[in-house]
């Protein structure tokens, strides 16, 4: 589940120059970073779940071959 980014339309509260120059208020910048981080964690979790399922499938195939060889 990915979260959408938030833009409130308030004027920028940042008075000093920063690396973030996107005309968003500091709250929106902070919230968007947090949302980006949560989305990244969700994506990484999904990738790991897919990788774990693939590894489990390979283990099951190897165990099936091993049991077939023992039965022969």
Image: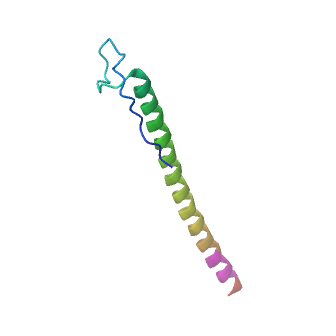
Which residue shows up at 43% across the image and 42% down it? 4
Which residue shows up at 38% across the image and 32% down it? 7
x then y, percent, for residue 9: 35, 28
Q: Answer left or right for 65 relative to 33.
A: right
Which residue shows up at 32% across the image and 24% down it? 20
x then y, percent, for residue 69: 65, 82
User: Where, quadrant-wise, is the C terminus in this rendering?
Assistant: bottom right
x then y, percent, for residue 31: 46, 30
Q: Answer left or right for 8 relative to 1.
A: left
The overriding secondary structure of the stretch rendered in magenta is helix
Question: Which sits in the foreground, 63 or 21?
Answer: 21
Which residue shows up at 60% across the image and 67% down it? 59
Q: Does the magenta stretch include residue 50?
A: no
Q: Quadrant of residue 29?
A: top left
Q: Give the range drawn in magenta.
A: 64-70
Q: How many discs appear?
A: 0
**Residue furthest right in the image:** 71
Q: Answer left or right for 34 relative to 20.
A: right
**Residue furthest top in the image:** 16
Q: In this view, does 53 lie above or below 39?
A: below
The color scheme shown is rainbow
Question: Which sits in the foreground, 43 or 33?
Answer: 33
Q: Quadrant of residue 27?
A: top left
Question: Which sits in the foreground, 59 or 44?
Answer: 44
x then y, percent, for residue 19: 31, 22
């Amino acid at each position: 589940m990915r979260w959408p980014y938030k833009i409130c339309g308030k004027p920028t509260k940042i008075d000093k120059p920063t690396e973030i120059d996107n005309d968003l208020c500091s709250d929106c910048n902070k919230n968007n970073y947090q949302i980006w981080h949560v989305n990244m964690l969700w994506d990484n979790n999904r990738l790991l779940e897919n990788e774990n399922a693939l590894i489990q499938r390979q283990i099951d195939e190897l165990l099936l071959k091993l049991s077939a060889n023992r039965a022969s």
